[in-house]
Amino acid sequence: METLFIKEDWKQSRRSFMKRDIFLPVKSRTRILLFIVLMLWIAVFLQMAVERLFMKQETMSEAFSELRTEDNVGTVSVTAMYPSKFLSEYDKKQLIYVLAEEIGLEVEEEPAVFYANNRCEVWYEKEAARAHTLLKVVSIRQNGAEEHLLYAKLSIQEKTAQSAVFYQECLREALEELGAEQISVTLELSGEQPGQLSLEKKNTLTNALLESLSARTVYEHRDNAYYTVYAYTGRIDEYIVVEGKKINVQVAVSYDREENVTKIYVATPMLES
């Protein structure tokens, strides 16, 4: 009998041990389940953020490839206000060096300086075989206060538009790190097709490009003399508002009689000129 009681006590102790160590209380299990669900959602959001960033960087270059143009040029123009009451000439040159470093540009000579009335410009310009870069700091004194404008323009001749899109993000990030305000970025892609395209061909190319961007037309003027389309796509964050309507894509087509080529331009949010 004593042996039987010992065995029963051992079985009871074993069951109690298993309940304590293997089967967690309901509240603990709920917390762990919630934690696992939270981690899964975080992983999903991170993946979506990465995919959105990748898609944003590839959107314009992939769309531009639809045109199958030659002699392609990608141009990035950036303007921003630098929030400082006073910048010495040395400070302005340092800003030029910082922007140059961010885009991997080697500054081979000291930036130029120009003074006129209440205006001071410090700039560095470099011409390469297939690229042109201009970096500039403009300071204007009005009513006893000074405003500083940062300007960068980079043009790259290439088969695709990937480099231009890459430098667009580099310059934006550089200005944000500098604490610049009112940052405005324009990305313009241009290419050529031989001869004069018919209106039907222009429409086909433009429609294919807008479709690849998931863009809807906002304003348009389509004829052989003047061809331009303004559109909006949610795949690009930046936009401007014209007459209460969002615009962040412009397509323009023109014919150059002297060179006998049709030039096609795509820009976000719109062409500079």
Image: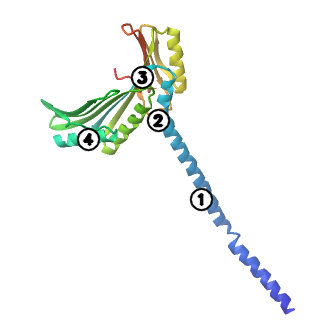
Return the x and y of residue 38 as percentages of the image width and height.
58, 54
Task: Provide the residue designation for mark 2.
Answer: 57
The secondary element bearing badge 1 is classed as helix
Secondary element at tag 4: helix
Q: Quadrant of the N terminus?
A: bottom right
Pinpoint residue 207: horizontal percent, then vertical percent.
53, 18
Q: Give the distance between the C-alpha atoms of the residues marked 2 and 3, in whole angstroms.
A: 18 Å
Which mark's residue is nearer the viewer, 2 or 1? 2
- Label 4 crowd bin: few (<14), some (14–19), many (20+), radius 10 Å: some
Q: CA distance from mark 1 to mark 3?
A: 51 Å
Q: Of residues 109 and 145, which is closer to you in this image?
A: 109
Q: Position of residue 93 (x, y in %)?
A: 21, 40
- Amino acid type of disc 2? Gln
Q: Amino acid at mark 4?
A: Tyr
Q: Earlier in the sequence, mark 2 or mark 4?
A: 2
Residue 153 position (above or below residue 35): above
Q: Farthest front residue? A: 129
On the question of residue 166 being in view, the answer is: yes
| Pointer 4 or 1: first along the chain | 1
Q: Residue at x 59, y 59 (%)?
A: 35
Looking at the rendered image, the disc whose residue lies closer to the viewer, 2 or 4, is 4
- SS at mark 2 in the image: helix
Picture quadrant where residue 224 is located: top left
Residue type (three-letter) at the residue carrying disc 1? Phe
x, y percentage for residue 228?
43, 16
* Circle 3: element type: strand
The disc label shown at residue 35, or none: 1
Q: Residue furthest left?
A: 117
Q: Disc 3 designates what residue?
A: 72
Cα gap from disc 2 to disc 4, whole angstroms = 25 Å
- Frontmost of labels 2 and 3 is 3
